[in-house]
Image: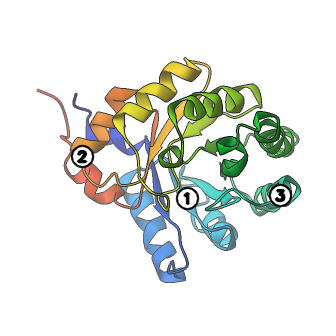
Amino acid sequence: MQIVKKDLAKMIDHTSLGSSSSREDVERLCSEAEEGGFYSVCVEPIYVPYCVERLEGSGVKVGTVVGFPHGANKSGVKAFEAQLAIEDGADELDMVVNVPALKAHDYRAVGEDISAVAEVVEEAPREVTLKTILEMGELEKDEKVAGCVIAQASGADFVKTSTGFGPSGAKEEDVRLMREAVGSQVKVKAAGGIGDYEKACRMIEAGADRIGASSGVEIVSGAPEQLD
């Protein structure tokens, strides 16, 4: 599978997360996203106001994380994080689900956790996208499927493979499984360890609608301007 540079860029959440992300890193991220035509930037919550102002009028959306990176915050804390992010101007929220509950097969708790954030998103004064990170590298196959089904039923717009801080990143087989589990009703985001054009294309071919990566520039640099 091949995809042209312009189309691929519109599928990328250009990402800078972690304690080492500086203001300079975020400024560079915004510049690269603007110049490259990426769909969004995804940054730590403290940088949302800066990115919203910096990218105003550019067409690049601003995303941030909730319950990151372990998903073990209480649901009320996640809902409050989501509310603050929306008030700061975030367009998209990447929420880590209650992974311990998912591992314990406490599916009611998983659903209630996602719903708490989904309700905040639903009440937002503008359209906000909710992505649910399942951390697939932590899960058995039945847990992966259950997580996708619960996310879909609880109001998520996306299911996402991983935080990038877990035991493994995006895998093609997981993306296929997620796509099969949610059908066409919910979108799929592949993230974690995607550093080049070829791997991004494999993820898209497997069913990913969006790619999360800190290597957005490197990924699109390998894409053709047009197909023969």
The three-letter code of the residue at mark 1 reads Cys
The three-letter code of the residue at mark 2 reads Tyr
Q: Label 2's element?
A: helix
Q: Earlier in the sequence, mark 1 or mark 2?
A: 1
Q: Label 1's element?
A: strand
Compared with 227, 63 (above or below) is below
**Image-quadrant location for residue 181:** top right
Q: CA distance from mark 1 to mark 3?
A: 22 Å
Quadrant the C terminus occupies? top left
Quadrant the N terminus occupies? top left
Q: CA distance from mark 3 to mark 2?
A: 37 Å
Give percent across and percent down for residue 195.
Answer: 29, 55
Residue 92 showing in the rendered view: no
Picture colour scheme:
rainbow
| Residue lying at the far front of the rendered structure | 104
Q: Earlier in the sequence, mark 3 or mark 2?
A: 3
Q: Could you tell whether 41 is left or right of 173 in the image?
A: right
Judging by the rendered image, the residue that carries numbered circle 1 is 42
Judging by the rendered image, the residue that carries numbered circle 2 is 197
Closest to the observer: 193 or 9? 193
Q: Earlier in the sequence, mark 1 or mark 3?
A: 1
Closest to the observer: 81 or 92? 81
Q: Nearer the viewer, mark 1 or mark 3?
A: 3
Give percent across and percent down for residue 137.
Answer: 47, 47
Q: CA distance from mark 1 to mark 2?
A: 19 Å
Q: Residues within 10 Å of mark 1 (few under 14, many from 20)?
A: many
Residue 180 showing in the rendered view: yes
Q: Residues within 10 Å of mark 2 (few under 14, many from 20)?
A: many
Q: Nearer the viewer, mark 3 or mark 2?
A: 3
Compared with 89, 91 (above or below) is above
Q: Which mark is residue 74?
A: 3
